[in-house]
């Protein structure tokens, strides 16, 4: 069987499966191939070929060529060796076959809904960008995209990026890597596999709650969201590690909440928050209030003294880490807090409190890299909308 026949057999097999299930399909190949427009099979009207390509994916079921399909080839290669493909009607003979053409894989791509939940982007384009995605509202996928594949505007704008991503392969995987090579410039998944992501292990609360059971609402910070669920009468705060390397940071805060539980220092710890069984952080009660000012010094001092009474140093006291509620001051953002018996450090934190509450710089709290990147993306999108 020559290569054309091999390609034909693979193409017809996967296209037939796709046609039966009303789905799109792909054949992955390497080598240099030219394409012509044609009708592949009844039900696949207006199949388009966007351009010549050297290596990549051939897609069936495409409706049109456009920006979102840049770099991809849509359609089926035809040659005189298999003009008997059912429904095909070539407009002209096939040309320019590379002897090195080889079939790498065939697969049926199932229709899916992909949502980008979180992202971490290298603003300079020197290192990969990372995404946390949800497929069909139930499968988490962590995607690494190599630099210089997509424009910064596309990386920052989920609807545009989703149009340009290669099709998600079938299979039981939760990690994928998108790259390109000189021999295959079309972006594609170069690897997918089931990866064991880190989990918070310092568990102390008896209850946990699954992320997919929550309705995630307004983003308050890069890793902090308003959330709701029928199981809770009021809105709650969901704080969680978006990516594996953040687990250690939030594991520390989880421990701190175990130290202060029942002492009226921070928001009430409701439950550990899980994703596919692993713990990614927690749910807290939503505290209605405002950030502290100098007039709130007495109540702020009182809550800090309770914290110090437990031998805990906050290490990041500022006006933005106090919420003043009807019940008094509440401390938040405890990820930097540590056990300490250093009397001088504890006294210095109390003495510096007045100055922190008088500060008008607007600077305060720990700013995560992800928060800076999301602010940068928002600025980039605003600039594009003005331009």
Image (cartoon, rainbow, N blue to C red):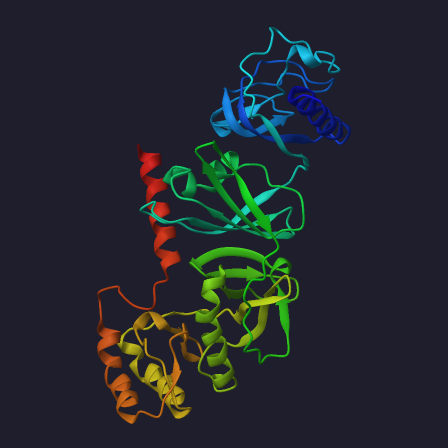
Q: Position of residue 113 (x, y in %)?
A: 62, 42
Q: Position of residue 61 (x, y in %)?
A: 65, 25
- Seen from the viewer's position, the closer of residues 204 and 146 is 146
| Residue in the image at 48% along x and 87% along y | 263
- Seen from the viewer's position, the closer of residues 10 and 349 is 10
Residue 19 occupies quadrant:
top right
Q: Residue furthest right?
A: 20
Residue 230 relative to residue 244: left or right: right
Q: Position of residue 134 (x, y in %)?
A: 58, 50
Q: Position of residue 55 (x, y in %)?
A: 53, 29
Residue 182 relative to residue 382: left or right: right
Residue 197 relative to residue 4: left or right: left
Question: Is there any visible trace of residue 232 in the rendered image?
Answer: no
Above or below, 210 against 44 in this view is below
Q: Residue furthest top?
A: 92
| Residue in the image at 50% along x and 69% along y | 286
| Residue in the image at 38% along x and 75% along y | 336
| Rendered-image quadrant of the C terminus | top left
Residue 322 occupies quadrant:
bottom left
Question: Is there any visible trace of residue 161 in the rendered image?
Answer: yes
- Seen from the viewer's position, the closer of residues 141 and 320 is 141
- Seen from the viewer's position, the closer of residues 308 and 92 is 92
| Rendered-image quadrant of the N terminus | top right
Above or below, 371 against 111 in this view is below
């Amino acid at each position: 069987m020559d290569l054309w026949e091999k390609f034909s057999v693979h193409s017809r097999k996967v296209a037939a499966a796709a046609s039966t299930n009303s789905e799109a399909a792909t054949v992955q190949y390497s080598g240099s191939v030219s394409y012509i427009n044609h009708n592949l099979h009844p039900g696949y009207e207006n199949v388009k070929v966007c351009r010549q390509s050297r290596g990549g994916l051939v897609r069936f079921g495409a409706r049109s060529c456009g920006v979102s399909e840049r770099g991809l080839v849509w359609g089926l290669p035809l040659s005189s060796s298999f003009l008997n493909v059912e429904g095909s009607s070539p407009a002209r003979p096939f040309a320019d076959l590379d002897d090195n053409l080889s079939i790498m894989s065939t697969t049926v791509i199932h229709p899916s809904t992909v949502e980008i939940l979180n992202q971490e982007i290298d603003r300079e384009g020197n290192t990969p960008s990372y995404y946390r995605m949800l497929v069909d509202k139930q499968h988490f996928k962590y995607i690494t995209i190599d630099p210089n594949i997509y424009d910064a505007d596309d990386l920052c704008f989920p609807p545009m990026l989703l149009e340009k991503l290669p099709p998600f392969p079938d299979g039981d995987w939760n990690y994928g890597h998108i790259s390109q090579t000189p021999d295959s410039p079309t972006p594609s998944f170069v690897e997918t596999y089931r990866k064991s992501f880190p989990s918070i292990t310092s568990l102390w609360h008896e209850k946990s709650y699954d992320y997919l059971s929550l309705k995630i609402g307004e983003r308050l910070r890069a890793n902090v969201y308003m959330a709701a669920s029928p199981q809770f009468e009021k809105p709650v705060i969901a704080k969680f590690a978006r990516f594996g390397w953040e687990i250690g940071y939030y594991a520390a805060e989880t421990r701190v909440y175990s130290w202060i539980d029942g002492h009226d220092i921070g928001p009430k710890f409701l439950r550990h928050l899980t994703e596919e069984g692993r713990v990614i952080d927690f749910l807290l009660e939503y505290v209605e209030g405002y950030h502290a000012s100098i007039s709130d010094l007495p109540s702020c001092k009182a809550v800090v003294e309770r914290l110090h009474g437990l031998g805990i140093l906050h290490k990041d006291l500022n006006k933005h880490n106090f919420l003043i509620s009807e019940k008094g001051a509440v401390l938040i953002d405890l990820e930097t807090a540590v056990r300490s018996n250093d009397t001088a450090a504890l006294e210095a934190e109390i003495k510096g409190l007045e100055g922190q509450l008088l500060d008008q710089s607007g600077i305060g709290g720990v700013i995560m890299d992800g928060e800076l990147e999301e602010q940068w993306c928002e600025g980039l999108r605003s600039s594009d909308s003005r331009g």
